[in-house]
Amino acid sequence: MEKVKVGVVGCGTVGTGTVKLLLENASVIEQRTGIRFELVKVADRDWDRPRPFEVPERLRTTDYREVLKEADVVVELVGGKEFAKKLLLEAIELGKCTVTANKHLLAEEGREIFRAAQKRGVFLGFEAAVGGGIPVIKALREGLVGNRIKSILGILNGTTNYILTRMYEEGLSFEEALNEARRLGYAEADPTLDVDGWDAAHKITLLATLAYGSFVEFSSVFVEGIRKVEHLDVELGKELGYTLKLLAIAKERDGEVEVRVHPTFIPSDEALAKVSGVYNAVMIEGDFVGKTMFYGQGAGSLPTASAVVSDVVQAGVFLRKGGLVPRVDWSGRPLKLTQNFYSRYYLRFSVPDRPGVLAAVARVLADFNISIASVLQKEKACKIAGNDSPVVPLVILTHKAYEQDVRKALERVKSLPVVEKEPVLIRVEEEAY
Amino acid sequence: MEKVKVGVVGCGTVGTGTVKLLLENASVIEQRTGIRFELVKVADRDWDRPRPFEVPERLRTTDYREVLKEADVVVELVGGKEFAKKLLLEAIELGKCTVTANKHLLAEEGREIFRAAQKRGVFLGFEAAVGGGIPVIKALREGLVGNRIKSILGILNGTTNYILTRMYEEGLSFEEALNEARRLGYAEADPTLDVDGWDAAHKITLLATLAYGSFVEFSSVFVEGIRKVEHLDVELGKELGYTLKLLAIAKERDGEVEVRVHPTFIPSDEALAKVSGVYNAVMIEGDFVGKTMFYGQGAGSLPTASAVVSDVVQAGVFLRKGGLVPRVDWSGRPLKLTQNFYSRYYLRFSVPDRPGVLAAVARVLADFNISIASVLQKEKACKIAGNDSPVVPLVILTHKAYEQDVRKALERVKSLPVVEKEPVLIRVEEEAY
């Protein structure tokens, strides 16, 4: 029986789940692979904090170097950037196979780490960095290896999906839904990484990098969170047959790639629209496979541990039986990222309920070559926060248009005397399936 | 640059798609893997029949032995059982890695083929045998390798899903929907394999074998097709909030495994219920990952080619870089298959609309320890085919009960003087998510 020694650094939520899995399911993994994965050491700075699963005394250490010394496969689950990076680079330098769930680090500074692993010829797994327990990275790299990837649409952040689900289903405001998510432990005290879209942006950066074979510069990814989402738009969208989701998108069009995260309307009868609460889903379209979707729990101790361990097993197989060091930047050409997206748009204007207003707005859109698909003007005046005069929301759904044209048109519309307040722009995706 | 020579035997629908993919996307596969996959030979008996993609003259042969001679990886896409088996065993004997999409052969006689591959130490891929382009076998074997599998629920046959979708959405009868499917090319002239559940049963046999690590005896799988599905039940189920699907199910309970295929009601707001038309989906529940779902096109030339090629690439990596020969029967114990399912049931009785009928039926169910969850009795009499007297449908939804008890209860109910016609039994799954 061949053996692989596994060590874990960082015993928080995911670390504890990983330890539990490696201890409880070692026998089934051994049966399936013919390799015995033995957990030899778990490092954490604090062994006094309460955990839902007790790590056996003999495995505990407070010195991560013990893990580096004893393990064949090193699992980094400390989070954060500085120490995690140092740890991964040290482990790689020692020739250890490594596994991490650290999307933040990989998306922002992954280039250096991926290249070190490639150069040293060691396996670096990060299945758990995207989509929690969903084996989406394996699907993208291996299951769909024969496909050119046309697009990826993902609901990649459970916190924001929970908030938007509650706004849609229960009519809550953003603040109410966020507070509820906090009470239930779905949102951190400081929810910035989630609510402002950064977490989803980290994840789509990694997926786009794998799909298109060239490092995506994180700073070039367009990111808009859900903090400014008004309940009125969730309601109006619902009436038009759309559900609002924080969608992470990567698509190729004419040699250019769009990578973006923003609130997005998708038709309510499509599968992605039904992904509710803290669940995640990723829709990948390939030139041969067509549309595929992968769904599951995007976070949490045990689901994420499932992904971590699938990487541990792949690393162990690589060590004992051989295999490929998967390439990350394989295309040999820099990616051309565009900010001039090509999309459909939901535009909401706050206008007085009197003749000629629609005509004036429509005229401007036409001037910028933006074609109108449908219009919703509500008869009853709404009270809009910060504005006491009764205005009605005028909603225009466009056909596909270029973002730059839409932005220019909005600037022009804003200068019209009839338009009050800042117009609302929400992008629309109709291709989720 | 390392090279792998690929040969295809059988150039029908899937074969043609595979040839097209290997020729058109060779460069992207080479970039991703660092290995050049070269298609060297394609064998078919008939090069005159029209194909949507022209196979270059230089690759064509009518002699499969040329493929065996020249290729490192042999792809079997001839279908059927006898010749396909001979071909696979010959290729394995020669030490070739093999890839097949043949669920029929593998489910019914796979044991011999899997064992030969394991013994000879060659890779045998069959991703395309289940779920078309969906990389579900890879997910089950590798992505979820750390999990004990609690259950698998799959919509694995596009033809029947198309028919049931049309019955549900448009109110068609089974015959009408089948004829429509035939016209559109979704159903074969002889639709037995699809409509009677055999194709789905082949697929769940393979998934259950992988999930539980022991060959599932195909003849022990419970199979009931959709041929007898009445439109009335589709309608009544819809009214109760359920959608009828042909579900393939494998679940473990107390050391026993249920493997079964039958029409099944699932709550209409669950994701599996939304899988419509010719799409497939598989829900896999693991002890750590929780519920995951994989969705995509379950058939067709190009999606299935995507799965075939992912196996070809895995085989090539195995040949050039090493790796694991994945185990099929790893548990070392025979599987205990039970036919005494534990499920919820939809029971429809045809009864006269008069007092005491419900009481009599309910009494019998209570005698067999079957607990009633809800009852629907329609006021208006229906005309039921083959019966001229006006009867009303009495629908009883049970809580979870043992199949044997339910069957005994139905025998007793049938002997009641008030019950006309054979009662209808449809199983209900509430856990799809």
Image (tube, coloured by chain):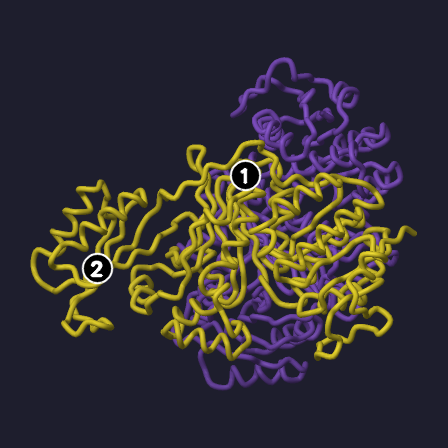
Chain colours: A purple, B yellow
Dot 2 corresponds to which residue? Answer: B349
User: Going by the image, does B402 lie left or right of A309?
Assistant: left
Going from N to C along the chain, the mark reached first, 2 or 1, is 1
Q: Are marks 2 and 1 on the same chain?
A: yes
Picture layout, residue A367 above or below residue A142: below
Q: Position of residue A62 (x, y in %)?
A: 69, 17
Q: For mark 1, does the 10 Å Cα neighbourhood hold few (<14), some (14 to 19), or many (20 or more) residues?
A: many
Q: Would you identify the image quadrant in which residue B243 lies? A: bottom left
- Callout 2: chain: B
Q: Is residue B433 visible?
A: no
Residue at the right extreme of this rendering: B1
Residue drawn 59% across the image and 78% down it: A416
Give, as a three-letter code, the residue at label 2: Phe
- Callout 1: chain: B
Give, as a three-letter code, the residue at label 1: Tyr
Picture layout, residue A415 above or below residue A28: below
Report how many numbered discs are placed on residues in the image. 2
Q: Position of residue B293 (x, y in %)?
A: 54, 51
Pick the front one: B399 or A174: B399
User: Going by the image, does B283 lie left or right of A193?
Assistant: left
Pick the front one: B241 or A374: B241
Question: Helix or strand or loop: what does disc 2 sit on?
Answer: strand
User: Going by the image, does B170 lie left or right of A267?
Assistant: left
Tell me the tag on residue A162. Answer: none
Q: Would you identify the image quadrant in which residue B166 lies? A: bottom left
Q: CA distance from mark 2 to mark 1?
A: 37 Å
Dot 1 corresponds to which residue? Answer: B212
Pick the front one: A195 or B139: B139
Residue at the left extreme of this rendering: B355
Q: Would you identify the image quadrant in which residue A302 lies? A: top right
